[in-house]
Image (cartoon, helix red, strand yellow):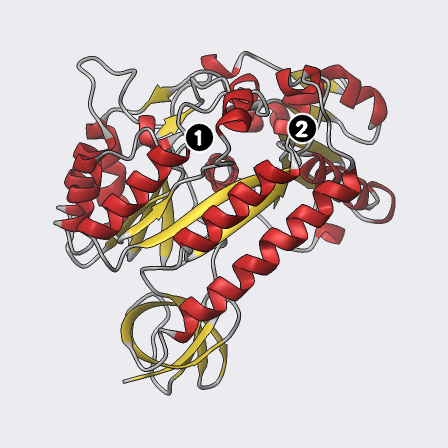
Amino acid sequence: MSNLGCARNLVDSEIMHGQLAAAGFTFTHDPSIADIIIVNTCSFIASAVDESVDEILELAEFKKTGQCKQFIVAGCLPERFRKDLAESLPEVDAFLGTGAYHKITQVLKHPPEKGSCLLPAPVDLPLQTHNTRRIPSTTAMAYLKATEGCNRHCTYCMIPRLRGSLRSRSTEDIIAEARHLISSGFRELVIIGQDTGCYGRDLSPDVNLSQLLEKVADISTDTWIRFLYGSPDTTDERLIRTIATHENICSYFDIPIQHVSSRILKRMGRPYDENVLRRLFDNIHEIIPEAALRTTTMVGFPGETDSDFEQMLNFIKTVKFDHLGAFIYSDSEELPSHRLSGHIPADVAEERHHILMSAQAEISAEKNQNHVGQIYPVLVEEEIEAGLFSGRSAFQAPEVDGIVYIDSADAVVGEFSDVKITDALEYDLRGESI
């Protein structure tokens, strides 16, 4: 099984893995000897579509050269392109949209007509529960999906179309899964959703992310708790203080801002401005001075002027985020933003992206240099070679941030190790266990 895209997609793949294992299927990492190949795809932006199609075409070759008898494509790509995808990829036996991945066993045991598309409405997908069979693909850390879907209407985003409206799992059910994961040996739980900060707003009576974090954190003080994918308008003072008062909740705020120009933010459908953002990040650092900040921005959005871009660049240089990811606006006829005036030439957008990421590289290098000589607990995740391990500190989220290389004779994968930082790279750190 090949998984592409976000952490939410990874959880879906882990659930498919669990269902197939329960049904008696066995697994191999070698596609040349696989009887069945499954690709769980992403289609959020153009580059993700290209990556998904490339992966499909590469693995489809094993229907000719290997043992593959059934080739299944699941996830956001078939949900977005629907029957048009089936017509362009005749190698695929069946397509499962985002609302159908839980039917994987049924599809394999009772194959539908070749090229069939199973595309039930994503909002009708049964929510995962703590009893859902799942085989995590990670070692020390596990993702904990709290919500499906999103109720926002950002003009550049098709997540509500691909995943449906916001639906939150009950707090009790999430707690039950968290207990199971912790008892299984995971030392970090990362709470995720399409819009994690809105957790619980659809429940009755409603609950919020602060309450969920408190209850998960109280299960085990020896386990790190982190959440990803917040929003400026849901990161309130209660949430900040909840993180401040629980030592095992990582003081790490992932808050995508997308832009700071009021004009561009209005066009994007984002409900804040630069002043709101400045107050928010100042408030976080006032309450938690050591807090790590991560954000995501977008360049080349329709109508973005040189002045708009400079405003965002100056903001980035002032706030000095610990981690930052930047996307170039990805256009599509399906998006409301496609109909906006002032589309930016690709070369201009690429140059702005280069300038922004170069500025962030300098900020990250400076931030990392400040860690040299400090001692941090690090969650050890991999033994690279004898005496050399890799892991993450509390200010580094899995997959999206840098890592810590650890020189150690006795570090244990899946456990914490106190590490003295001895060297700083552009995005990564190196240290020795003490």
Q: Report crowding for label 2: few under 14, some 14 to 19, many 20 or more residues within 10 A (C-alpha).
A: many
Give the label, 2 or 1, closer to the camera.
1
Q: Is residue 376 above or below residue 431?
A: above
Which numbered circle lies on residue 6?
Answer: none
Is 175 or 209 nearer to us in this picture? 209
Q: In front: 69, or 344?
A: 344
Residue denoted by label 1? 194
Q: Residue at x 44, y 86 (%)?
A: 387
Left or right side of 319 for 158: right
The percent position of residue 256, horizontal first and vertical second, equals 45, 39
Describe the element under mark 2 as helix, strand or loop.
Answer: helix
The image quadrant of residue 207 is top left
Type of amino acid at the residue the image marks with label 2: Leu
- Residue at 33% from the left image edge and 28% from the top image edge: 233
Give the residue pinned by disc 2: 77
- Examine the rendering and report whether any part of residue 197 can be seen: yes
Residue drawn at (44%, 16%) of the image: 165
Q: Is residue 6 visible?
A: no
Above or below residue 90? Residue 7 is below
Which of the two residues, 433 or 2, is positioned nearer the viewer here? Answer: 433
